[in-house]
Image (spheres, helix red, strand yellow):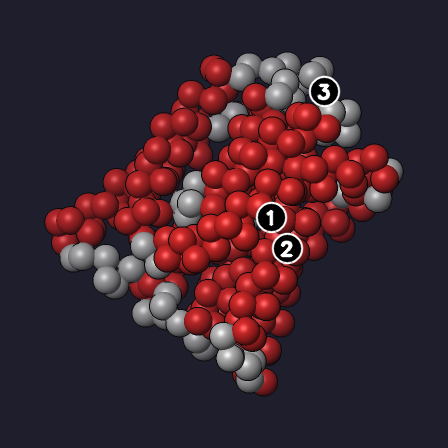
Amino acid sequence: MNTLQAIVLAIIEGITEFLPVSSTGHMIIASSFFGIAHDDFTKLFTIVIQLGAILSVVILYFKRFFQSFDFYFKLLVAFIPAVVFGLLFSKKIDALLENPVTVAVSLLIGGVILLKVDQWFNNPDTSETSNEITYLQALKIGLFQCLAMIPGVSRSGASIVGGMSQKLSRTSAAEFSFFLAVPTMLGATAKKCYDYYKDGFILTDDQINLLVIGNIVAFIVALLAIKSFIGFLTKNGFKVFGYYRIIAGIVLLAIHYFIHPLTII
């Protein structure tokens, strides 16, 4: 991986981390086009730079994030399912991360769901806020989030839909999804770093520099993306993202089956 590739992947991460389009799926596609998708450092890089993106949540929602221990416990409850499923299925998840066809199919199915989600869960803006949910609601949202372990599903999309299924408005569900990203991505990063060193890999100075650059770029881009997304989501809902996912999924499948097998992706 070179510096330009690291910057491109970080920009993709910053834009897509909090959108319901799957940041992991997009980075798998981009890194595959670069020819570096199977590299162990690339897999580490795509996880670790998510720290930069989630730091933007802490900055933007500083006062609300540091509010009460009760809120932290609810985030912990929502985070627990990801820990359990992540530990149980980590090897299968890693295998899926190398399969762009899985990403394409997930994008397609997720797009169809996003076209319908506003009809299924038409919650008014006066519904419960992200600070007022119960522990049971938090747990259910956490279970929805686990669907994102399948590449292409979208962690933010799954958890936002989970929040809306629990009577949260689009805005409140999105905000809770942002908050939940903090422990989830911290946990994923710690686990990936541990596995990387356990497998005998050691980061070089150049690789450490790439991680620093990636986190900085992802942080800056995510700051802009979050503000834009909340305003757009409140006014327009999920349909645009649904259509985007469907088009992206169809294009990727077409490339694979009619142009070139996705060994390049």
Say few, some or many: other residues with alpha carbon within 10 Å of mark 1 (under 14 / 14 to 19 / 20 or more). Answer: some
- Viewer-proximal residue among 40 and 170: 40
Outermost residue on the right side: it is 68
- Residue neighbourhood size for the residue with mark 3, other residues' Cα within 10 Å, grouped as few (<14), some (14–19), many (≥20): some
Of marks 2 and 1, the one in the foreground: 1
Spot occupied by residue 207 in the image (x, y as percentages of width and height): 54, 79
Quadrant of the snapshot with the C terminus:
bottom left
Label 3 is placed on what type of residue?
Answer: Glu
Q: Nearer the viewer, residue 62 or 96?
A: 96
Label 2 to label 3: alpha-carbon separation: 28 Å
* Three-letter code for the amino acid on which mark 2 is drawn: Gly
Q: Which label sits in the foreground, 3 or 1? A: 1
- Circle number at residue 83: 1
Q: Are marks 2 and 1 in contact (CB under 8 Å)?
A: yes
Quadrant housing the N terminus: bottom left
Q: Residue furthest front?
A: 88
Q: Is residue 125 left or right of residue 201?
A: right
Q: Position of residue 153 (x, y in %)?
A: 43, 41
Q: Amino acid at mark 1?
A: Val
Please tell me in which quadrant of the rendered image residue 260 appears: bottom left
Q: Is residue 249 left or right of residue 71?
A: left
Residue shown at the point (58%, 23%) measured from the top left: 164
Which residue is pictured at 44% across the width and 28% down the height?
114
